[in-house]
Amino acid sequence: MSGIALVRKPGPRLAEGIVTHIEREQVDHELALVQHDAYVEALAGCGWRPVHVPVADDLPDAPFVEDAVVVSGRVAVLTRPGAPERRGEVEAVARTVRELGLNTVRIAGPGTLDGGDVLQAGPHVYVGRSARSNDEGIAQLAALLPERRVVPVALRGVLHLKSAVTALPDGTLIGDPRHVDLPDLLVPEEEAGAHVVPLGGDRVLLAASAPKTATMLEKRGLTVIKVDISEFEKLEGCVTCLSVLVAD
């Protein structure tokens, strides 16, 4: 599998990004830029062509581009982020996905939806009920993706659904049962191990902060591509947040 990786470089106000469930730490902006470049290079090395949304100097959370759009096939669902200060991130993403030839639809108020709450696994689309995504937003997503089975999921103590659970290439859900009730969860060795990005075939992207989980996944026959995203983790970010993959 290959295609396009939608990404967005951190702006100068990155350190001001919203923090909800963890203590705020100092963010090294220069290191974040280096880490973001390495993240993009890792995607490119696995066949995903980077397409950059323009940098947003006044929007600290803009590099978490996943929250602004959900892509299913050739349909791009433009979100309405639950944090009002993040809603300005969506328009530049909208222009970029239209330039890629995707069909755009949109979540409308009073619905709210963050892309980080949307986990696609086979025919299912799991959507976290969170402080950022409400029932109206979830219902609108289901109506916009009638060919998919949308499954609302309750969350505990995490920002987004994909802060707690993601899916391996074979569809196995990997996640932390402290935060989410889903059947047959594969439990990672570290909290950051719950966040994987399937890159095609047996390859998955994983944060360098989850070395024991990397070993566990390698024993399952997966090829693990490790990236250091420490500065983004200080802002409740993970490997899923920093890109949207659009398959050819």
Image (tube, rainbow, N blue to C red):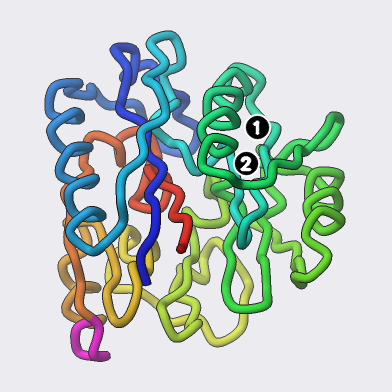
Q: Position of residue 187 (x, y in %)?
A: 40, 77
Q: Secondary structure at mark 2?
A: loop
Residue 95 is marked as none
The residue identified by callout 1 is: 81
At mark 1, the secondary structure is loop
Q: Which residues are magenta?
A: 218-222
Give the amino acid type for the residue marked by disc 2 in the picture: Asp
Identify which residue is drawn at 46% across, 62% down.
Answer: 247
Q: How many marks?
A: 2
Q: Does the stretch in magenta take in 198?
A: no
Disc 2 crowd rating (10 Å Cα; few below 14, some 14-19, many 20+) is many
Is residue 197 found left or right of 39 in the rendered image? right
Residue 6 position in % (x across, y down): 41, 43
Query: Quarter holding the N terminus?
Result: bottom left
Dominant secondary structure of the magenta stretch? loop
Q: Are marks 1 and 2 in contact (CB under 8 Å)?
A: yes
Residue 25 visible? The answer is yes
Vertical position of residue 216 compared to residue 29: above or below: below
Identify the residue shown where x is 63% and y is 72%: 181
Q: Is 11 located above or below residue 193 in the figure?
A: above
Residue receiving disc 2: 114
Q: Residue furthest bottom?
A: 220
